[in-house]
Image (cartoon, coloured by chain):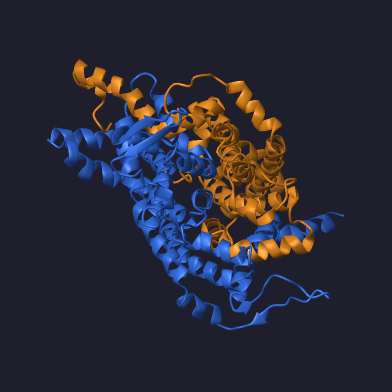
Chain colours: A blue, B orange
Amino acid sequence: MTDISQRTNENPSWLKRNKLAIAPWIFLVPALIFFAIYVVIPIFESLWLSLYEWNGLYTADGQSTATWVGFQNYVKLWDDPNFWVSLRNNLAWLILYMLAVPAGLMIALFLNQTVTGMRFYKSMFFFPFVISQVVVGLIFGWFYNPDFGVVGTIWKWAFCEETVNILGNATFKCARPVPDILSSPEWATYGIIFAGLWPQVAYCMILYLTGLNNVAADQIEAARLDGAKGWKMLWFVVIPQLRPATFIAVVVTVIGALRSFDMIAIMTQGGPFGSTNVLAHYMFEVAISEYGERYGYGSAVASVLFAIMLVYISYFLWRMYQDEKDSR
Amino acid sequence: MFPRPIEKSGPGTRVAYQAFLPVALILWLLPLLAIFLTSIRSAQDINSGNVFGWPSQFKLLENYTAVFTQSEAAQYMLNSVLITVPTVAISVALACLAGYALAIYRFRVAVPLFFLFVAGNFIPFQILMVPVRDMSVQTGLYDTIAGQFLFHAAFQTGFCTLFMRNFIKALPFDLVESARIEGVAEWKIFWYVVLPLVRPAIAALAVLIFTFVWNDFFWANVLTQGESAKPITAGVRALNGQFVNNWHLVSAASLLAAVPPVFMFFLMQRHFIAGLTLGAVK
């Protein structure tokens, strides 16, 4: 009897012995399966599909009608002016969206006080980030409207003379015509980016407010005793300590700029004449359009966007890896 | 503290600061205030060009009721809830499990797998669009509520796992160690030791994912076509076409669409902000 019980203690079942090796996989499997089906595998399918021409249809026996075209979609992209306009606009988004980082820092510095009611002010300043970009797009679409939007109203007040005819209808005589920002091929993109900055500044602000909470007070005091103040203090003492916040702010702003889709779809749908398209929206437009579906070509556009994003993702992962190594 | 606390400045600066705060806030929220004022105006005001001045009549109840009676807004709102709530439940549950595995166990692929979840969270949606749409059509999930929440849940699992893993990693490992020495089963350690400690992370993720998914517009366009499964964001766009030039109704509908995430934010502000900083800024 004792012999047997000792033996089972020395030689527990395989499952028991490898408990620590098997357990993580049991915890991981549901998330991994889900993530693989909806995220990992589709990435490779898209890359693969970009080498095909396909209208998304299947034959009666369930075979895909896609035909292999190799790199032809990419060759076509190279000669597609809409693609280059979209790419150029993506660049404009990337550069101008970055203004959200310093602007967010400025507002955070302005709000980093402890007067009564400060919590309320901070959360109200954060407000634009919480509402959907669809709503932000609609708000600004109306804001820019030359006839009855805020921009139009202010412009008329400043540059126009109102005359009322005998029927009681008001007409305006303007020294300069009211600008129709969203119908202008030159200005529409900047109008949308400006609208997009509104929630993004709020996001960066909240990151910096949290960062400012953790700035070491003793270093500030020490620098103050050494006579540092104002800009010098900000540049040499505070901003270096805000580096983690700045890092996250830059990452989310880059991702946000490259993901910009909602506002464009709401405010201009890529128009006028495709002048406000970005890759994310152009891809959607070519893949699912009224003129039939072009899944292969759309996937090629998506692959280019993915490649651009991959640069930032790799950088982010590399930074994370450095932190992981340090923490061990 | 930087900048220098305002209390240490002269009374003049302090008064000026406190007086300027509400002005700055009104300027910052001007677009929102303008649209709110529009949403309570009458149609006559809009037509006669009174869009910036004081409303001649207040039509708050009338306009907001009109949104529900003259459109499918109620259906869209319900759809949004039916999409958002299961997404939150599934993705947070999966992330608790996966985050626990990646934070507690030391195995060779733990870090690469973790990075896979992180990377997946940052990719552009467009690279997933065609295969996910095709798969949804093939499996009958296209234009359904389930088709949307299954996708969102899977995608948000990436972000949730990133957050959960970092949160669990920051817990004292001794707790797990001593439970193991006591001979507690692994799943019991997860359930009775770790899960009660990650409640703040669950709250942060729940409110964040709720907001992200509620505000989704891209996938609503890719995965639905009819009214029956459309969430409110896509619905507001449809209303925008339906109520052409009825800006008071479009404004009211837009603000209604924004209410639930705003409500969640004010309810759980602290958790929301903790989540947004990706756990990197403590």
Q: Is residue A204 above or below residue A307?
A: above
Q: Which x, y percent locates residue B2?
A: 26, 33
Quarter of the view holding residue A216:
top left
Quadrant location, the N terminus of chain B: top left
Q: Is residue A262 above or below residue A231?
A: below
Quarter of the view holding residue A236:
top left
Quarter of the view holding residue B251:
top right
Q: Which x, y percent locates residue A47?
A: 58, 73
Q: Is residue B188 left or right of residue A114?
A: right
Question: Residue B53 or A77: which is nearer the viewer?
Answer: B53
Q: Is residue B169 above or below residue A306?
A: above
Residue at image point 39% right, 64% down: A88
Quadrant location, the C terminus of chain B: top left
Q: Is residue A137 shown to the viewer in this render?
A: yes
Question: Residue A51 or B112: which is nearer the viewer?
Answer: A51
Q: Is residue A210 shown to the viewer in this render?
A: no
Q: Which x, y percent locates residue B194?
A: 62, 41
Q: Which x, y percent locates residue B222?
A: 65, 56
Residue at image point 37% right, 52% down: A190
Q: Is residue A123 above or below residue B189?
A: above
Residue at image point 58% right, 43% down: B215
Q: Is residue A125 left or right of residue B241?
A: left
Residue at the extreme front: A166
Residue at the extreme right: A1
Residue at the extreme left: A227
Question: Residue A325 or A288: which is nearer the viewer?
Answer: A288
Question: Residue B194 or A285: which is nearer the viewer?
Answer: A285
Q: How many marks?
A: 0
Q: Is residue A8 left or right of residue A44?
A: right
